[in-house]
Amino acid sequence: METSLRGILEKDLDSVTVEVLKTALRFKDFLPMKSIEDFLFGFLVGMVVARMATTIQIFYSRQINDAETSELMDLIQRRTLEIKGKIKLAMGQ
């Protein structure tokens, strides 16, 4: 993954705030779910992946490739504990 794309991804992950998560918590009022934590984690990962795919499509006029997807998933995996910690903060735990 190019350095500029990696920087965008890192900033995107850094932008996950308790306020964003509290907004996403509103879904629990009308969507049945077993684990709100898992829902929020999936919501955030989906948001980040969609933004990265859209960024590549806009700036490079192509789809995200397998290598970029793999690197994206590796980065998300490395930051999972951080993201889950923010989820717990948003939930007041």
Image (tube, grey):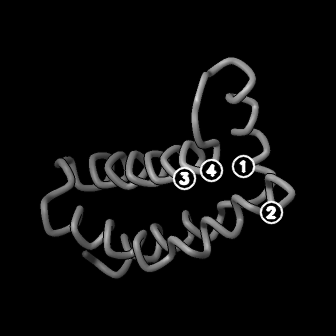
| First-in-chain label (2 vs 1) | 1
The CA span between labels 3 and 2 is 13 Å
Residue, disc 1: 21
Which corner quadrant holds the N terminus? bottom left
User: Does 81 sit left or right of 2 as displayed?
Assistant: right
Q: Which residue lies furthest to the front in this view?
A: 34
Label 2: how many Cα within 10 Å (few below 14, some 14–19, many 20+): some
In this rendering, the answer to whether 83 lies above or below 48 is: below
Work out whether mark 4 precedes mark 1 in sequence or the reverse, and give the earlier one: 1
Which disc is residue 89 wearing? Answer: 2
Q: Where is residue 14 in the image (x, y as percent from the top left)?
A: 62, 70
Q: Please identify, in this view, whether the residue under mark 4 or under mark 1 is nearer the observer.
A: 4
Which element type, helix, strand or loop, lies under badge 2? helix
**Residue 37 numbered mark, or none:** 4
Q: Using the numbered discs, state the Cα–Cα distance from disc 4 to disc 3 in whole angstroms.
A: 6 Å
At label 1, counting other C-alpha atoms closer than 10 Å, the crowd grade (few under 14, some 14-19, many 20 or more) is: many
Dot 1 amino acid type = Leu
Distance, label 3 to label 1, CA atoms, is 9 Å
Tell me, yes or no, whether the two marked residues, 4 and 3, touch with CB atoms within 8 Å: yes
Closer to the eye: label 3 or 1: 3
Q: In the rendered structure, which amino acid carries the disc numbered 2?
A: Leu
Where is residue 37 drawn, in percent x and y? 62, 50
Residue position marked by numbered label 3 in the rendering: 41
Determine contact: label 2, label 1, CB under 8 Å.
yes
